[in-house]
Image (tube, grey):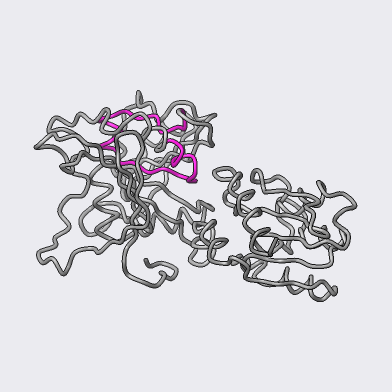
């Protein structure tokens, strides 16, 4: 077995924490001595023990003199839990193999430095691309201060997310609906517009699969939401954040506050719509590291027009409705060479549907306050 083989095991372990660790990253760890796996562990849930600690506990005395494989640099600061580096040093491992450096400014190489200062051999960069890709939202958030944004929608094969009357239940198959709920559970927050709330009265919790409920965010510039909206219920299971524009009357916010629902005010742009860049900056301040934009068409169009997305997931069902509502409206593009170029990242089937993962084809990352 090679270092790469053991790191692959650590990556597989890390994925078990998907949807439960944010705003912390997913991390897996494997302890090996004399070619034998002595213990394994992964970060199960935010606030609980980290992967290295779980692996060391599983190995017991077998960690001494062993090699620790971990997908992300061991932390060196006090957070919800004590520094993992201290536990690694106490376990007296002889070597640590790290997949990638932690981008968190509180760590950023200091964990590796401490290990080396104590005479432990450290190798860094084993399967680094895979380890970084595993936690892309975390890396994006740490480097930019902004959440990783996924735009997701289901459409018919002729590009409609609803019929001409607005009916949309259901565009996609049952298998795709379960996939969508799993995707929802893998994000810190889910965003919809007041139009979708009014037309569809969604709940936006994770119900069809096991998973953590995201923060439910409603873009409602003038606070015209009905008090009967389902998204205002079950606050003990899933919080709701209303986003209104300034200026906006406080009457509606007072009623919402009585139900335990917060209203966030953001500036409006020249067209009177909510300033999405300001919203994303505020979400970052609240430690929201990933956002799923579910619609409707106006909200999706706004995020696409301003290029405020990192990934797009399109579920296409083999149905035709003719005239209907489109996911992406007018972007004021007149020439094909002005179009937003995307690249296919992954394509697969769920039930009868085709699911496409797409990225903007432009290279380079955004800095703080830009995308």
Residue 300, image x, y percentages: 27, 48
x, y percentage for residue 218? Answer: 36, 40
Q: Give the residue furthest to the front.
A: 1
Numbered range of the magenta stretch: 181-207
Residue at image x 49%, y 56%? 137
Q: Position of residue 299 (x, y in %)?
A: 28, 47
The quarter of the picture where residue 268 lies is bottom left
Q: Is residue 194 left or right of residue 263?
A: left
Up/down of 355 relative to 230, above or below: below
Q: Quadrant of residue 95?
A: bottom right
| Quadrant (top left/top right/bottom left/bottom right) for the C terminus | bottom left
Tell me if residue 203 is in the magenta stretch: yes
| Left or right of 261 in this view: 202 | left
Q: Position of residue 120 (x, y in %)?
A: 82, 71
Specify whether 236 is left or right of 245: right
Any part of residue 323 in sight: yes
The reply to whether residue 220 is visible in this rendering is no
Query: Front-most of 30 and 244?
Result: 30
Is residue 369 part of the magenta span, yes or no? Answer: no
Which one is nearer the viewer's eye here, 154 or 68? 68
Residue under the point 30% across and 52% down:
274
User: Residue 175, located in which quarter of the rendered image?
Assistant: top left
């Amino acid at each position: 077995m090679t270092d790469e083989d053991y790191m692959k095991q650590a990556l597989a372990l890390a994925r078990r924490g998907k949807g439960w660790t944010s705003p912390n990253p997913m991390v897996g760890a494997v302890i090996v001595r004399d070619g034998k796996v002595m213990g394994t562990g992964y970060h199960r849930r935010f606030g609980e023990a980290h992967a290295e600690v779980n692996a060391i506990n599983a190995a017991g005395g077998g960690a001494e003199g062993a090699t620790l494989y971990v997908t992300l640099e061991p932390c060196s600061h006090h957070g919800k839990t004590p520094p993992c580096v201290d536990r690694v040093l106490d376990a007296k491992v002889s070597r640590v193999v790290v997949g990638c450096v932690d981008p968190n400014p509180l760590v950023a190489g200091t964990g590796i430095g401490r290990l080396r200062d104590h005479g432990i051999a450290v190798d860094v960069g084993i399967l680094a691309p895979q380890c970084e890709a595993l936690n892309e939202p975390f890396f994006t958030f740490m480097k930019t201060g902004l959440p990783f944004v996924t735009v997701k929608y289901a459409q018919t094969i002729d590009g409609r997310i609803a019929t001409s009357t607005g009916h949309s239940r259901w565009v996609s198959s049952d298998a795709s609906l379960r996939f969508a709920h799993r995707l929802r559970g893998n994000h810190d927050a889910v965003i919809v517009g007041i139009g979708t709330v009014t037309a569809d009265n969604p709940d936006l919790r994770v119900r069809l699969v096991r998973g953590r409920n995201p923060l439910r965010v409603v873009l409602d510039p003038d606070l015209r939401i009905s008090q009967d909206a389902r998204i205002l219920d079950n606050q003990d299971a899933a919080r709701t954040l209303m986003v209104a524009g300034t200026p906006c009357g406080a009457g509606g916010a007072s009623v919402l506050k009585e139900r335990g629902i917060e209203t966030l005010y953001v500036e409006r742009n020249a067209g009177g719509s909510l300033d999405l860049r300001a919203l994303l900056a505020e979400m970052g301040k609240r430690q929201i590291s990933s956002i799923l934009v579910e619609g409707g068409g106006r909200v999706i169009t706004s995020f696409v027009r301003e290029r405020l997305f990192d990934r797009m997931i399109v579920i296409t069902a083999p149905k035709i409705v003719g005239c209907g509502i489109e996911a992406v409206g007018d972007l004021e593009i007149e020439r094909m060479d002005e179009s937003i170029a995307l690249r296919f990242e992954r394509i697969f089937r769920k039930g009868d549907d085709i699911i496409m993962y797409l990225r903007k084809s432009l290279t380079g990352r955004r800095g703080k306050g830009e995308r």
